């Protein structure tokens, strides 16, 4: 029996879009299930225990600091009241947290894209996931300090309503920072240079004001938050309007970025001097060039590179410019390790996992494991030299007396740290997704072993500096000598790593295949 025209039109009619009333409960249930399943699939029990203890330690520290702040700031309050001291440093703290958020926090674009093939309104998807992004550790951890501080130190003076309004102002500032991060990241695709130039200018002005003691940020912070603990409906309405405006700005930018055509995941290689030079390299040179391109073209490896450069410059400026920071020998050892060895300590732990998607094909070719491990050793040792050069001006300006320590750790990191980290890398069993961000709590490929491995790397130089604290030049000489010995025996270490890769490659490839 032939189909009627009404049946035919019903069959080809496109599906209508799902309304917001039905969509929101569906998205909420899906996100709850996704979070639960993601937590269960995190992997090893040891990693979960370590991260839980670490998070609990940070939360306990922030809570204690907020509840008993006068005890900790007695020496630096300089006649100021506790709430005036906090109000004066709130904006500078929020600026620092924003840069940390920019480096680590993910944006909801990928989550939105996974629903675009369904008949859901695009604007509603963008709004939902932008709103869901506020449930982030970057927004929750600061409140662990702010809430007990307001209860203990603001409520007795300004009343419960004043304390609630001040906390609401902090929540509003965190939400604005969250939405501003989404907006800035949405503009990176088409305006990368302008965005990075703007962020760099803001960071430079902040550091200059902090170092020169201009107090511009402090005065601005005091003007903004100084009256926030005095109840006012006008202030509460202003906070709400600013948050809503920031949310609309972020949603609009994210929606606009979805309409634009995304750039290719891997940019086309243009002919140039480096490519011409690579053609004349031997096999090890080609493997080094392959590693560098993998590092720069993929999101998570590039994240480790950027964070290492930031630590060797911006964060190091804060530490070296603060008086009395290096009174603790142990802290000095950690700074020495990361100033030139930060990239090796972070990126090097997953040295073989980065190539999990094509490691099987790489080992099936005429690539002997000794050449493979030699190329990776050269990359890590070269990174120590690069970070040393980058951070050397910081030591020269702020702490020229610590330049010998910096030189000693250059030798130690290049000769010892890189070999210890490569020993850990030969035990890689879990593959990683190169396209994922290296954001907060993204520990794919890590296990408890990776966190505990920091001990044999950092403890020996720390103990050495503590034992010879009265003769630091002797400790630095021993560090440099041990590092130089490690450099002279690099080939012996390379052969050892190659033998271990040869013995473990089948287990390594089996683990990589599970993820893919």
Image: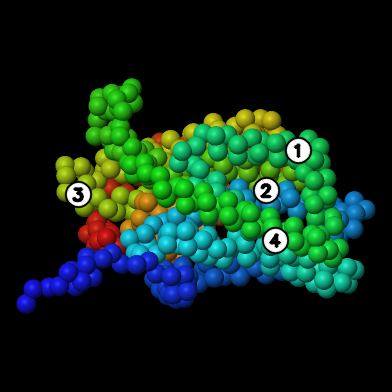
Q: CA distance from mark 4 to mark 3?
A: 55 Å
Distance from Cα at disc 1 to Cα at disc 4: 30 Å
Task: Say which of marks 2 and 3 sits in front.
Answer: 2
Please provide percent x and percent y for residue 193. 51, 34
Task: Give me the C-alpha separation between circle 3 and circle 1.
Answer: 53 Å
Q: Quadrant of the N terminus?
A: bottom left
Question: Dot 2: within a 10 Å radius of its alpha carbon, few (fewer than 14), some, or many (20 or more) residues?
Answer: some
User: Does residue 101 appear to the left or right of 456 in the view shown?
Assistant: right
Q: Earlier in the sequence, mark 2 or mark 3?
A: 2
Q: Which residue is mark 1?
A: 209
User: How far across and down, in percent of the image, does residue 335 sit?
Assistant: 61, 46
- What colouring method underlies this structural image? rainbow
- Tag 2 secondary structure: helix
Residue at 68% across, 68% down: 144
Q: Pointer 2: what residue? A: 95
21 sits left or right of 358 in the view:
right
Marks 2 and 3, how far apart at CA: 46 Å
Nearest the eye: 173 or 97: 173
Which residue in the protein does label 3 denote? 361
Nearer the observer: mark 3 or 1; the answer is 1
Q: Which mark is residue 240?
A: 4
| Mark closer to the chain start, 1 or 4 | 1
Confirm whether residue 483 shows in the render.
Answer: no
**Picture quadrant of residue 472:** top right
Q: Nearer the viewer, mark 2 or mark 4?
A: 4
Say which element carries label 3.
helix
């Amino acid at each position: 029996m032939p189909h009627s025209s009404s049946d035919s039109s019903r069959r080809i009619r496109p599906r209508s879009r799902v309304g917001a009333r039905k969509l929101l409960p569906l998205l909420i249930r899906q996100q709850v299930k996704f979070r639960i399943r993601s937590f269960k699939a995190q992997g090893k029990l040891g990693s979960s225990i370590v991260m839980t203890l670490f998070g609990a330690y940070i939360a306990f520290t922030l809570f204690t600091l907020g509840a008993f702040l006068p005890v900790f700031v007695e020496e630096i309050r300089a006649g100021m009241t506790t709430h005036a001291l906090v109000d004066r440093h709130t904006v500078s703290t929020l600026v620092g947290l924003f840069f940390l958020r920019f480096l680590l926090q993910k944006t909801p674009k990928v989550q939105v894209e996974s629903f675009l093939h369904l008949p859901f309104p695009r604007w509603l998807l963008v709004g939902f996931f932008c709103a869901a992004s506020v449930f982030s550790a970057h927004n929750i951890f600061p409140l662990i300090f702010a809430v007990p501080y307001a209860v203990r130190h603001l409520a007795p003076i300004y009343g419960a309503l004043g304390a609630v309004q001040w906390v609401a102002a902090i929540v509003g500032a965190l939400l604005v920072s969250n939405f501003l991060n989404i907006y800035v990241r949405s503009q990176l695709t088409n305006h990368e240079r302008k965005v990075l130039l703007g962020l760099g200018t803001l960071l430079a002005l902040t550091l200059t004001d902090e170092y020169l003691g201009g107090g511009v940020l402090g005065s601005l912070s005091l003007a903004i938050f100084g009256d926030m603990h005095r109840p006012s409906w006008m202030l509460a309405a202003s906070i709400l309007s600013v948050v809503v405006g920031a949310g609309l700005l972020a949603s609009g930018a994210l929606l606009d970025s979805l309409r634009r055509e995304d750039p290719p995941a891997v940019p086309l290689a243009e002919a140039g001097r480096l490519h011409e030079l690579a053609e004349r390299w031997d096999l090890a040179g080609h493997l080094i060039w392959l590693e560098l391109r993998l590092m720069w073209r993929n999101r998570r490896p590039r994240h480790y590179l950027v964070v290492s450069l930031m630590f060797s410059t911006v964060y190091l400026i804060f530490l070296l410019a603060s008086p009395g920071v290096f009174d603790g020998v142990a802290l000095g050892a950690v700074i020495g390790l990361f100033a030139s060895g930060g990239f090796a300590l972070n990126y090097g732990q997953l040295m073989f996992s980065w190539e999990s998607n094509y490691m099987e094909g790489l080992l099936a070719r005429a690539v002997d494991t000794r050449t493979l491990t030699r190329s990776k050793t050269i990359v890590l040792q070269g990174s120590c030299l690069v970070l040393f050069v980058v951070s050397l001006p910081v030591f020269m300006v702020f702490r020229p007396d610590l330049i010998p320590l910096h030189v000693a750790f250059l030798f130690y990191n290049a000769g010892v740290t890189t070999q210890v980290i490569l020993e850990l890398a030969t035990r890689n069993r879990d593959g990683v997704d190169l396209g994922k961000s290296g954001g907060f709590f993204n520990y794919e490929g890590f296990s408890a072993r990776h966190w505990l491995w920091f001990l044999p790397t950092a403890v020996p130089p720390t103990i050495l500096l503590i034992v010879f604290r009265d003769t630091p030049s002797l400790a630095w000489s021993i560090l440099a000598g041990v590092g130089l010995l490690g450099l002279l025996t690099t080939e012996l270490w390379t052969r050892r790593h190659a033998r271990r890769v040869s013995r473990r490659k089948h287990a390594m490839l089996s683990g990589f295949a599970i993820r893919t």
